[in-house]
Amino acid sequence: MSNTTKWALDIAHSEIQFKIKHLMITNVTGGFTKYDVQVNATGDDFTNANISFTADVASISTNNEQRDGHLKSADFFDAEKFPQITFQSTSFSKVGGDYELQGNLTIKGVSKSVKLGVEYGGLSKDPWGNIKAGFTISGKINRTDWGLGWNAALEAGGVLVGEDVKINCEIQLIKQG
């Protein structure tokens, strides 16, 4: 692509979050504080853009130090052995005014194909003349598909931690060069 435009993450205006059932009755929200997104597109058209994402597992935050420590342990992400979560797009296609993002998500050395919905917020120029693009990404994965299988049975039946993980990301990109 000779007309490739690079887009970089504006981390101050972005967030990577997930929600998972706890005690089968409420959701616990978490996220990552250290991550990066790189996008190569054709001009301002994101159709077929190449999108890569990395998250530093040690930056996981659920606003509970003890839980975060457990998530970083071998029971879940095993941050010491697998310090990064990665995603590499295989397709980014227009669906109406929005997009569908498909790619390979790698957690704990296991790569699986995932499909995520992407709401395109549009383009805007900030007060300093930078061109920004906004996206809301959502989807659902089953954590056990990546070997995150730890759980505990509850006395009343059911399990402590749900298997379905809802993904919700707000991503703002800055056009480069």
Image (spheres, rainbow, N blue to C red):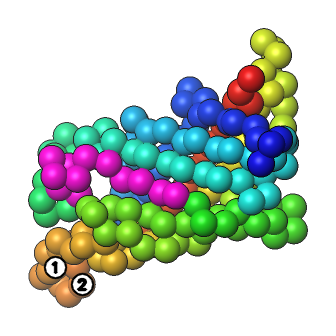
The residue under the point 18% across, 84% down is 156
Mark 1: which amino acid?
A: Leu
Relative height, residue 89 to residue 72 (above, below): below
Foreground pick, 82 / 138: 82
Q: Which mark is residue 63?
A: none
Q: Which residues are magenta?
A: 77-88
The residue under the point 66% across, 66% down is 91
Relative height, residue 49 to residue 22 (above, below): above
Quadrant in the picture for residue 137: bottom right
The residue under the point 20% across, 49% down is 79
Q: Dot 1: few (<14), some (14–19), or many (≥20) neighbours within 10 Å?
A: few
Q: Quadrant where the C terminus lies?
A: top right
- Give the labeled residue for mark 2: 158
Judged from the image, the secondary structure of the residue bearing numbered disc 2 is: loop
- Give the labeled residue for mark 1: 154
- Relative placement, left or right, of 75 versus 94 is left
Q: Position of residue 100 (x, y in %)?
A: 70, 67
- Relative placement, left or right, of 6 versus 78 is right
Mark 2: which amino acid?
A: Gly
> Marks 1 and 2: CB-CB under 8 Å?
yes
56 magenta-colored:
no
Q: Dot 2: few (<14), some (14–19), or many (≥20) neighbours within 10 Å?
A: few
Relative height, residue 46 to residue 108 (above, below): above
Mark 1 to mark 2 CA distance (whole Å):
6 Å
Q: Position of residue 145 (x, y in %)?
A: 33, 77
